[in-house]
Amino acid sequence: MGPLAQGADGNLYGVTYYGGTDSTGTVYKITPTGTLTTVHSFSHLDGNGISPEGALFLSSDGNFYGTATGGGSGGYGSVFKMTTKGKITVLHSFTQSATDGGTPT
């Protein structure tokens, strides 16, 4: 679990390494009053990656960017972009090759 990132909506966003519907991690948001909501649940089946770790980064485009330490289409993690609604776009899937490594944190 990494540091929290504050979204433009005032909510705080973070990741869990475990948990969610497949026990492979989540992105959650928590309101200033303490209400927690799961925004995205990672799965072995969707190719987005599993077990996110580290901080989410809020970009000036309003999306969050982060890393998952496993899964993805290459099997060794991913870099992803996520909307505040939880839609994930994979920017890169690691293959643990000599050119891109694997298991980002």
Image (cartoon, rainbow, N blue to C red):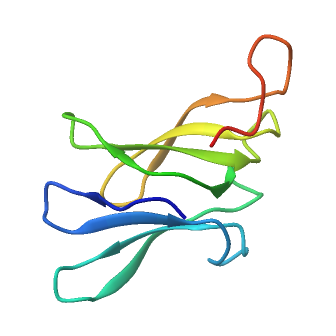
The number of numbered badges drawn on the structure is: 0
Residue 94 seen from this side = yes
Q: Position of residue 19 (x, y in %)?
A: 65, 78
Q: Is residue 84 above or below residue 97?
A: below
Front residue of 79/101: it is: 101
Q: Residue at x 70, y 62 (%)?
A: 43
Q: Position of residue 22 (x, y in %)?
A: 73, 74
Q: Is residue 10 above or below residue 46?
A: below
| Residue 9 quadrant | bottom left
Q: Residue at x 63, y 48 (%)?
A: 68
Q: Residue at x 86, y 19 (%)?
A: 97
Residue 48 seen from this side = no
Q: Is residue 86 left or right of residue 26?
A: left
Give the position of the N terminus as an image quadrant. bottom right
Q: Is residue 27 left or right of residue 43?
A: left
Q: Is residue 78 left or right of residue 8?
A: right
Q: Position of residue 23 (x, y in %)?
A: 72, 75
| Residue 30 quadrant | bottom left
